Amino acid sequence: MDLSVLVQLLLNGVVIGVIYALVAMGLSLIFGVLEIVNFAHGEFYMLGAMLAYFLSAGMGLGYWPTVLMVTALAASLGYVLYEALLVSLRGESFERSILLTLGLSMVLQNGAVFLFTTTPRMMLTGLTYRNVTVGDVRVSVLRLFALGLGLTAFAALYLILYRTRVGKAMRGVAQNREAALMVGIDPRAVSRLAVAIGIGLSGLAGAALAPVYAVHPLMGFSFVFKAFAIIIIGGLGHISGAAIAAVALGILESLVGGVLPLVMVDALAFIAMIAILLFRPQGLFGRGVRV
Amino acid sequence: MTRGGSLRTASVALGAGTLLAVPTWTGNEYVLALGVSFATFSVLASGLNLVYGYTGLLSFAQVGFFGIGAYTAVLLVLERGWSLWTGAAAGGVLAAAVGLVIGYSSLRLSRHAFAIVSLSFALLCMIVARDWVSLTRGSMGIPGLPTPTMNLPGGIHWRIAKPADFYYLLLGFACAAQAMIYVVVTSRLGRAMRAVKLNEALAQSQGINPLAYKLLALALSALLAGAVGGLFVFYLTIVDPSIFDFYYTETMLIMVIMGGPGSFWGVLLSTAVLTALPDALRFTTDLRMVLYGGVLIAVMLVFPGGLGGWLQRRRLARWRRPRSLPS
């Protein structure tokens, strides 16, 4: 095996892993704060990518304004989603949250199929064919941008959670809702913010990946199930665990897919998840059993 | 017999009579196709109702059992020369065995873990059917399934070729399956399952082993889903990985949620309505799924008990109403 091919696969794996991480961290944040498993999370990734396509191909916006606008719109959509649907679920059962968000996912996904058909679209920008070459390794600029955006979002999320008051409040609600209420934290405001950040990250992931892969209405559907597997492997509600598991999965998929042809690459995440649930139910990085 | 009871008996008899007579009134293939679809979905939805509505386990695995039954029956009939009957039965048994393995391994944790594992199981089934090309012929599937035949008692050789034949075959199986589920849910077993759903610790203190009842519900629903998959696939005349499509899961979930989890007749009624209505409105599949999603959100927000829960509440309200005593 050629070393440069290996480096290439590794790099692709890191990029896809960082995008997995953006989606999985949002899912994990929402689960941690609201105890809701958001089945519609992948659809916001899809909406982010579709929106990026229409802003850039339809309205001729550049790469950076598109990414910023999509992220901002996705975060505001998160606010609306929380106030319109999720607020009534507070303290409700796990099953009900799954069914409600599953309904939302069906509406968004099939609505998008109805409006735009399932034809994949390529988002072409001025940067599409630009590459960076180091030795024998060649990487497209857009993949590097996606990587950079992902790492920036990691850093921003870390700073919000660990360096701001509102982040502290969010972690407080995630640890103990009643106790947080007792010390004067408004769970509703905190939950709303968590949903907005989670959906915003998902939209950002869609916008970052839209110019790299084809955009179509069914792209969010398979993605969200992988994200479930990732947050279970990393430990439910454990955000950095989800990020590590996501990057590891991205690298593993890229290496296995590149080295051994015809292996069920898509099955890796689920098999790993089932193994984790059987032998270490709290996840790789979790402490207590919280599944 | 109470007034409600005789009304129910009459409407069930009327419904069954109408369903039996349909092919004699009309040879219209479209109507018969709706009937086949109703019969198939009624088995899937009632099985899910047994697992989710009565026992309280949210399961996404039902479609996996359905597809496992379909693939098993097809492979046994085509490659081993088994009859339709034994092939479908083997599909059901294999599905039930797989169900027991998944249930036993994930229910040790919690019902939440079960929901997630059942979802991944269904997705894994689809990936395996797509990628295990030497067995399943991959995403092209196995097309052109032969016309099945069945030896009936009395030496009649039944060739199941016309839509009306499939209609009777699946309707007959659905009736048998519904009768079986009805017997289970109205017996001691059904009461124990409800107890497990409502309060597991309390049920345990009454000497009920929750795991045993959960596994029983899961295995029975898997057996029926696998067998109906084995029969239905010969009507489709092709088996490919889309037999594991998430569409089936979403549809049967909506049927159970709208009919009311834990309500036998409510789920049957909503299955009939949801089979007929979108077709009558000439909706495309995308619009139908948008409609189903909207219904799911609305039911979750407005009436969490579904149709059955609403009827139950109305009945309770009627009992509680003060009545003037007969003088």
Image (cartoon, grey):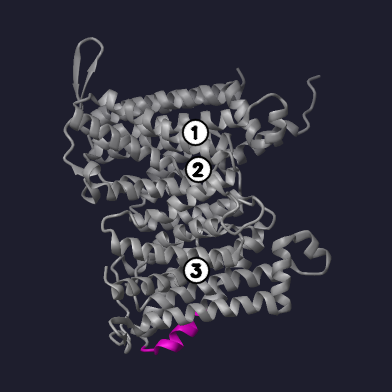
Is residue B266 something that shows in the picture?
A: no
Out of A64 and A81, give the one closest to the viewer. A64
Residue at point 30%, 36% (across, down):
B70
Which part of the image, by quadrant, shows the N terminus of chain A? bottom left
Q: Are marks 3 and 1 on the same chain?
A: no
Instruction: Check the image and name the residue furthest to the top.
Output: B154
- In reply to whether residue B137 is colored magenta, the answer given is no
Q: Give the range drawn in magenta.
A: A60-71
Q: In 3D space, how far apart are the residues under numbered discs 2 and 1 (Cα atoms)?
A: 9 Å
Q: Quadrant of residue B147?
A: top left
Badge 2 sits on which subunit?
Answer: B
Can you identify the residue that label 1 sits on?
A: B218
Look at 31% across and 62% down and name the residue there.
A257
| Tag in front: 2 or 3 | 3
Is B250 on the left-hand or right-hand side of A211? right
Residue A261 coordinates in the image, percent (x, y): 26, 58
Question: Of the numbered discs in the image, which one, if any, rests on residue B59?
Answer: 2
Residue A87 appears in the picture as rendered: yes
Badge 2 local density, few (<14 within 10 Å), some, or many (20+)?
A: many
**CB of mark 3 within 8 Å of CB of mark 1?**
no
Query: Disc 3: which chain?
Result: A
Q: In this view, does B195 lie to the left or right of A137?
A: right
- Residue occupied by mark 3: A21
- By secondary structure, the bulk of the magenta-drawn segment is best described as helix
